[in-house]
Image: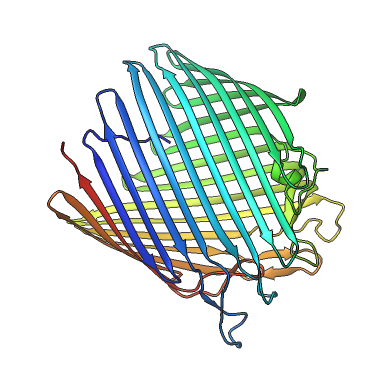
Amino acid sequence: MNSHFPDQPKLQFQSGIGSFGKFSNSLLYKRKYKNWSSGLRILYQEAENDFPYWINKELPARKLTHARTEQVGLMQENKLQLSKNQTLTWNIWGQQLQRAIPATTTQRVSAASQLDQSIRTTLNWQHLGQKMSWQARTAFYKERIYFQDSLAGVDADSRAWTSISEVEQTTNLGNWKIYTGLNFTYLQASTDGYPNGVDQHRLASFTSIQRQYEDWAFAIHLRQEWANAQTIPFMPSFTMSYRCHPKIKISVAAARNFRLPSFNDLYWIPGGNPNLLPESGWSQSFETNYTPSKTMVITWSGFNRLLENRILWQPPANGFTWSPSNVDQVWSRGFGGRWSWNTQVKAVKINLQSGYDYTLSTATKTKDIFSLNKQLIYSPLHQGYANIEVNWGSYGIHYLHHYTGKVLIQHRSLLELPSYQIGNLVLEKSWKFGQVFNTIQLRINNFWNANYRVIERRPMPSRNIEFNLFFNFNITF
């Protein structure tokens, strides 16, 4: 979001290989002139993804086929310092991803493929004043998704264009800070199902008032929006934080929520539902930060959200084509905790982190009696992680362990995907050779070789290895 341009030209090259035909390269070059800075990033990645998987341990392993991916991308960043307090930035990002879509565990073969193409550009002007600042920005996105499946007789070409323009003013009045602004968004899309295209005009005005005291702060955010000349419900939100003790900070928030269906929700071929209603509701949250020492932070948080007409994508009882529909009312609530601790023993630096989330999301009003008061599909009730990082001079070791609880995949039959645990291990060694800073990295993904699914009928990779080399060049002209 805030790119840093070094005083000296910087050149960085990365190359990696891995299991299942993975190969990647990336190049980054940044340079800062007197009042102009520029950066260029190029990336390429491919993989066969022909990993083995098991339907169950009693059957022999199968090998995933027709799963090759190839991705190429380019990003150009430019920043011009117009004066001491004025800057102009321009960025462009292009990307293409070609992928073959493998057969599910219940299909014999697949002929499906998908081409994703996008180009996104932004222009931003900023004027920073002592008491008043201005910012004007505009963006243009052009995106294409081309899906083909000769076996299913599907040849769907979807294109979308988005234009966003926004102007914002910031006023500083001592401990008060006031933001005001306007946003205009234009969206247009065309698909085989809607060859004449569909479009949407959205205009929004927003105001934010913030006040900072010694031990507490609050902010009020107000937003009014119109879509195709129709008024969207007024959306206020409020946040407040209070440091009740030098080591304890408490924060609370409340907001009105409203979301129009996206073009994918409405018009995606196949599966889109043009009869969707917008989501609306209210949410509340709290957070407590406890810092018992300089090296330890403990955070507890909780939330409550009630949404009417929740938009939920789900698979049919028999078939493969997912489609969205409105759930009359969904009540989501939960809590979570985070813990981090770091220390240094002589030349050894140690960082430990862990977290847990409990999220209960149920349909409290619905026409489907089988899903009433049951957890939403693919929504885990329990999730947790533990992370340890140890650095000793030029050596580093990093291990991340993640747990995901079981999830419902169908309400009528109460089918579930079992819980799973994934461990990833990273080993690193850095050294300097002349003016080149080098890092060699070994990654072992799915260290414990778990056999798991995130989505039913879609196998996930077994244990796999990546080997990466990073080269950072200091260039002097």
Count of numbered labels shown in the rendering: 0
**Above or below 200: residue 157:** below
Q: Measured from the top left, where is residue 195 in percent x and y?
A: 76, 42
Of residues 415 and 364, the one nearer the viewer is 415
Figure quadrant of residue 368 = bottom right
Q: Residue at x 67, y 33 (%)?
A: 187
**Above or below 249: residue 230:** above
**Above or below 12: residue 86:** above
User: Is the N terminus in the top left, top right, bottom left or bottom right quadrant?
Assistant: top left
Q: Measured from the top left, where is residue 372 in percent x and y?
A: 81, 56
Q: Is residue 71 left or right of residue 152?
A: left
Q: Is residue 318 left or right of residue 394?
A: right
Q: Measured from the top left, where is residue 468 in percent x and y?
A: 32, 62
Q: Residue at x 39, y 68 (%)?
A: 18
Return the residue found at the far left: 434
Q: Residue at x 59, y 28 (%)?
A: 164
Q: Is residue 252 left or right of residue 12?
A: right
**Above or below 317: residue 91:** above
Q: Residue at x 79, y 62 (%)?
A: 316
Of residues 69 and 304, the one nearer the viewer is 69
Of residues 182 and 47, the one nearer the viewer is 47
Q: Can the viewer see residue 256 in this picture?
A: no
Of residues 281 and 66, the one nearer the viewer is 66
